[in-house]
Amino acid sequence: MKSILFVFLGGGIGSLLRYGINNLMASFSEKFPFGTLLVNVLACLLLGFLIGLSAKNLFSQEMKLFLLVGVCGGFSTFSTFSAESFQLFDSGQALSAILYMAASFLICLLAIYGGMTVAEQL
């Protein structure tokens, strides 16, 4: 039961972070979903960093649940990414959809790697 509470609290914080960043990016995201792209890249960078720190046994199991599952899980948003990709395709913007999906995939992989590399240096 305690584990569920840690995931729940972390997820709420991550969701609020996602909401705030998407609101800040709203003016840039009229034709391209920059807000979601930024959120997912930041979430991957944070997740990679936390995975790197976790490998050094710096976190308790509860803290891992709170940060990795809760905060990062609530912060990133694959369902929104998928819906926005579909909307771009559906509105005839196939090139934007493909660029968005490719950029999200590649940049997020690099962000995971970058976060883990930074954590290893600490």
Image (cartoon, grey):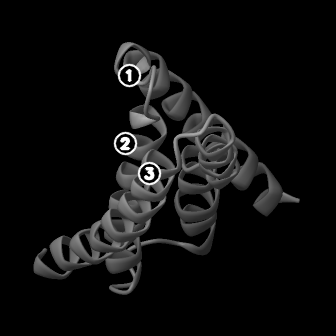
Q: Which residue is at a point 13% across and 74% down the rendered structure image? A: 122
Q: Position of residue 25 (x, y in %)?
A: 38, 22
The type of residue carrying mark 1 is: Met
Q: Which mark is residue 80?
A: none
Q: Are marks 2 and 1 in contact (CB under 8 Å)?
A: yes
Return the disc, 2 or 1, that comes first in the chain's sequence. 1
Q: Secondary structure at mark 1?
A: loop
Q: In the rendered view of the protein, which quadrant contains the N terminus?
A: bottom right
Q: Which residue is at a point 19% across and 82% down the rendered structure image? A: 120
Q: Nearer the viewer, residue 121 or 24?
A: 24
- The residue to which callout 1 is attached is 25
Q: Position of residue 11 (x, y in %)?
A: 66, 45
Whole-angstrom CA distance, mark 2 to mark 1, is: 9 Å
Q: Residue furthest left?
A: 121
- The residue to which callout 3 is attached is 95
Q: Nearer the viewer, residue 51 or 96?
A: 96
Return the disc, 1 or 3, that comes first in the chain's sequence. 1
Q: Which mark is residue 38?
A: 2
Q: Which residue is at a point 68% across and 47% down the rendered structure image? A: 86
